[in-house]
Amino acid sequence: MRDVIIIGAGPSGNIAALNVAKAGFSVEVYDWRTKIGDKLCTGIIGQSCYKEYPPTKSQIYRSTSSATIVAPSGKNYLINNSNPQAYIIDRISYIEAFAIKAVDAGATYHLGKKIVSVEITDKEVTVRSEFNGHTEVSTSKAVVVATGFGSPLLKMAGLGNDENKNFLTGCQTAVQTDDLSRATVFLGSQIGHGSFGWLVPTKHNQALLGLATPRKLNGQMDSLIKHLINKGYFKKTEYPIRKWGIPVNPSTPTYNNRALSIGDAAGLTKPTTGGGIYYSLISGELAAKALINALKEEDLSAKQLRLYEVAWKSLLSNEIKLGNFARRMFESIKDSQIEFLISKLMTDDVRGDLLESNSVSFDWHSGIIKEAVMHTVFGKCLNILTPEFTRQKSDMRSTGSFEVA
């Protein structure tokens, strides 16, 4: 019997496998894909992720300290910082590198095999996989679900999945561009209400074109492509559009007897942008720590594994709540209100306090959200458009904290 079976070879699954294997326990990783890391993702990490889980130079397409915001009117606003704020990476090679280290530490990978069922008893976990029409059965002491968003395996393992009815729909393709030097974000009803689009340069004049919407896709991506072609950003797309679901709320519980969920499967992403690499790596490490302790204690009960959820909540819970708060506000405002807020944000007395402050972080968004709400000028603008900010500011002043229900 294996010690741990991990379902999913993304960032969370690979780093969990690496840490558990390094601790001397047997690990097997299953993924229905044949190429590790080949999942839809823009592949941007911030400074915190860069420092804690550093990519190699060959895995970095470029660093960036600036971005362009295109308002609904079409007016461009440049956001610039003196230091790099993010890194655009080769996601496949970056994620694959964790798997290579895990194999070197003793983990075994089964690619192209799809797990179709998970059964948990008091004594063991049984998983069934399918490959070329054949079914295989494997057993372990514990299972980690790292499959990504919306997997039916969560329910089979007694883990949370009902709360993830709230999600974004992301879609992406590649285009050839000329002289696109920085990431560009597109806002407004031409993208879709509450939606945003992006062009992110990678290498050799290629860029990733994507869109995230709180609604089901209904021609928004086609409209964005047509709009940007007319504006001269590119001439055509390079490959068919692919789409995926992005959770914006944790799907609890993320623990059960002999089972944990991590990464996107647990709903651990940044609600503001949908980014998941950093939170996935964090949750994978925390899950591995909880499993190692449980295996040493020979206690894989829900009570013991609950320590994993306690750990990720202490780091990420309020960050995710604040991100969802900001996202709900963005989804509630009109084009004219977006224009008003951006114009105020880019004035000298606000720009230096917020966009160029030390609170700006691609990985941790709560700092700038708090400062925006409390800012003497920009906070008043938010109060005018979104009354909920008034209540949050009052709560912050009275309690000394900024908590969002």
Image: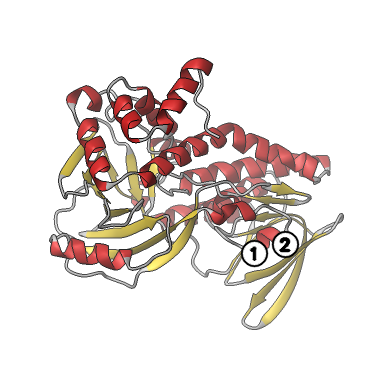
Measuring from the top left, give residue 130's x and y in whole percent: 66, 76
Say left or right for 22 vs 71. Answer: right
The residue beneath circle 1 is 152
Say left or right for 209 vs 70. Answer: right
- Is 205 located above or below residue 260 in the figure? below
- The numbered dot on residue 194 is none
Using the image as rendered, state which of residue 369 and residue 128 is in the foreground: 369
Q: Residues within 10 Å of mark 1 (few under 14, many from 20)?
A: some
Say left or right for 344 vs 136. Answer: left
Residue shown at 71%/44% (left/top)? 291
The residue beneath circle 2 is 156
Q: Quadrant of residue 384?
A: top left
Identified by mark 2, the residue type is: Met
What secondary structure is marked by label 2? helix
Measuring from the top left, give residue 42's x and y in whole percent: 37, 55
Measuring from the top left, give residue 196's x and y in whole percent: 32, 52
Identified by mark 1, the residue type is: Pro
| Marks 1 and 2 close (CB-CB < 8 Å) | yes
Residue shown at 53%/69% (left/top)? 33
Q: Is residue 38 visible?
A: no
* Image quadrant occupied by the N terminus: bottom right
Residue shown at 22%/31% (left/top)? 344
Q: Which scheme is used to colour this image of the protein?
A: secondary structure
- Is 132 located above or below residue 394 in the figure? below
Using the image as rendered, state which of residue 118 and residue 156 is in the foreground: 156
Q: Is residue 198 visible?
A: yes
